[in-house]
């Protein structure tokens, strides 16, 4: 790679199809060498956003810049960006090596074979150059497609559900490969997925999309522990949601919330006025049974070896889930307990 590593900047990027906004005012600055995952449900605009960055769609509004260069009006082939599509079709009649070298046609023969050999090493398929794609496993084909997408040294690689076609075991293995290749190259990757665990495993930062908008951007742990809303909270894992009203801003860690079952404390994730309707989000692993907290009845205890999953019922009938290490104190179903949590472990979200 030469020169200063580029930074991708999206400013108010919008794409409407008729009156429908598939991508709605997306603003994002991607760091050089960053592994960024776009996470969101089917139809939320992930592929459309990638197609805008690659130049296959013209934005209705907004700008795209990469390393100081404005790409907004450039056709796809003039952008230092490559895209690996949701279905990465390899040419079946060509060898793996020719598939990978396909985009390098302008270069000399020797230069092409040197570059192809380098790419085969990168994706750990050194011995597979002469094979036809149909003789490869799904994971190996995926790596050929990745090598092909990287052949022309894009400054930014966009990957649309690159692991979507793989079954579970292969998928986990290939996640590790993808991350390792990206680290070795230092090329910025934007990877679309609708699998939250995959996004958390791969990404430096995740952008959660909902109905065309980027609703939260941050490192995986931040999104998991400090989700901006209940959609993000539920997307990244199991979560308890306890409704209440925001208490006054007084001394002590976090803010108090008055719930139907008594006061609790949590961390505010956005500015809200006292008395606002809020939801306290607590992960099951942060809910602790003891003598302090919300009074509850244990309705079920499931032993899972390394941990125990407990189902609790609050006096109004709502259910909480707690998971943690097995303890001797686990009473039989129907026993009374208190469900507590550290203020630091609870996020206060707008209701
Ligand atoms: N060319 C088009 N014309 C009209 N509507 C379109 C067009 N392309 C996409 N859309 C609509 O825009 C929305 C977003 O589509 P997009 O393909 O970006 O979703 P996605 O997040 O990639 O979904 P998936 O996870 O299913 O791939 C959808 O409602 C889709 O129907
Ligand atoms: Mg898509």
Image (cartoon, grey):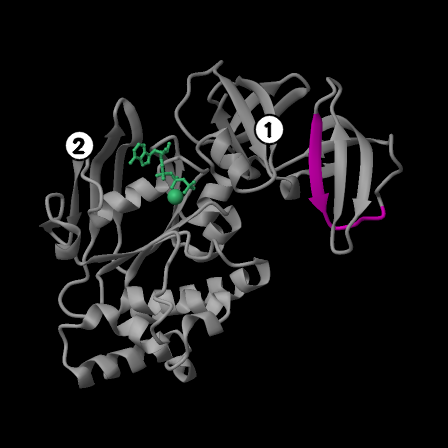
* Residue on which disc 1 sits: 241
Disc 2 packing (10 Å; few <14; some 14–19; many ≥20)? some
Q: Position of residue 344 (x, y in %)?
A: 54, 38
Which region of the structure is painted magenta? 319-328
Q: Earlier in the sequence, mark 1 or mark 2?
A: 2
Q: Residue furthest front?
A: 93
Residue 4, above or below 347: below
Side of 95 relative to 239 (left or right): left
Contact between marks 1 and 2 (CB within 8 A): the answer is no
Q: Look at discs 1 and 2 and give the one toward the viewer.
A: 2
Q: 10 or 58, which is in the foreground?
A: 58
Ligand 2 located in image quadrant: top left
Whether the magenta-drawn stretch holds residue 322 is answered as: yes
- Crowding at dot 1, Cα within 10 Å, few <14 / some 14-19 / many 20+, comes out as many
Q: Label 1's element? A: strand
- Does residue 230 lie above or below 66 as drawn? above
- Whether residue 338 sits left or right of residue 254 in the image: it is right
**x then y, percent, for residue 123:** 39, 73
**Predominant secondary structure, magenta span:** strand
Q: Is residue 139 magenta?
A: no
Front-lying residue, 351 or 174: 174
Residue at 26%, 54% (x, y): give it: 31
Q: Secondary structure at mark 2?
A: strand
In this picture, residue 80 sits left or right of residue 34: left
Q: Residue at x 11, y 51 (%)?
A: 68
Which mark, residue 61?
2
């Amino acid at each position: 790679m030469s020169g200063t590593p580029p930074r991708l900047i999206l400013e108010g990027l919008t794409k409407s199809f008729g009156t429908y906004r598939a991508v709605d005012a997306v603003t994002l600055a991607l760091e050089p060498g960053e592994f960024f995952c776009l996470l969101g449900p089917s139809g939320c605009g992930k592929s459309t956003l990638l197609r805008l960055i690659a130049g296959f769609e013209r934005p209705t509004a907004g700008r795209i810049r990469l390393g100081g260069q404005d790409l907004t009006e450039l056709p796809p082939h003039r952008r230092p960006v490559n895209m690996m599509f949701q279905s990465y079709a390899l040419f079946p009649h060509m060898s793996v090596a020719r598939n990978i070298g396909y985009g390098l046609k302008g270069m000399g023969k020797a230069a092409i074979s040197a570059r192809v050999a380098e790419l085969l090493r990168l994706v750990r398929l050194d011995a597979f150059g002469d094979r036809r794609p149909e003789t490869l496993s799904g994971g190996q084909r995926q790596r050929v497609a990745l090598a092909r997408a990287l052949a022309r040294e894009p400054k930014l690689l966009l990957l649309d559900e690159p692991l979507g076609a793989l079954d579970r075991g292969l998928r986990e293995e290939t996640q590790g490969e993808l991350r390792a290749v990206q680290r070795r190259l230092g090329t910025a990757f934007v990877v679309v997925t609708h699998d939250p665990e995959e996004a958390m495993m791969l990404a430096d930062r995740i952008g959660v999309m909902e109905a065309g908008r980027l609703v939260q951007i941050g490192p995986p742990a931040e999104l998991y522990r400090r989700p901006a809303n209940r959609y993000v909270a539920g997307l990244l894992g199991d979560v308890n949601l306890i409704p209440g009203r925001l208490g006054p801003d007084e001394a002590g860690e976090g803010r108090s919330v008055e719930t139907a079952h008594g006061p609790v404390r949590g961390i505010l994730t956005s500015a809200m006025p006292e008395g606002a309707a809020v939801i306290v989000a607590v992960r099951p692993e942060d809910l602790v049974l003891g003598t302090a907290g919300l009074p509850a009845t244990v309705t079920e205890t499931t032993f899972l070896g390394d941990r125990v999953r407990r189902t609790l019922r609050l006096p109004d009938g709502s259910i909480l889930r707690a998971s943690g290490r097995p303890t001797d104190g686990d009473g039989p179903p129907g026993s009374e307990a208190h469900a507590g949590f550290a203020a630091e472990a609870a996020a206060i979200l707008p209701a």
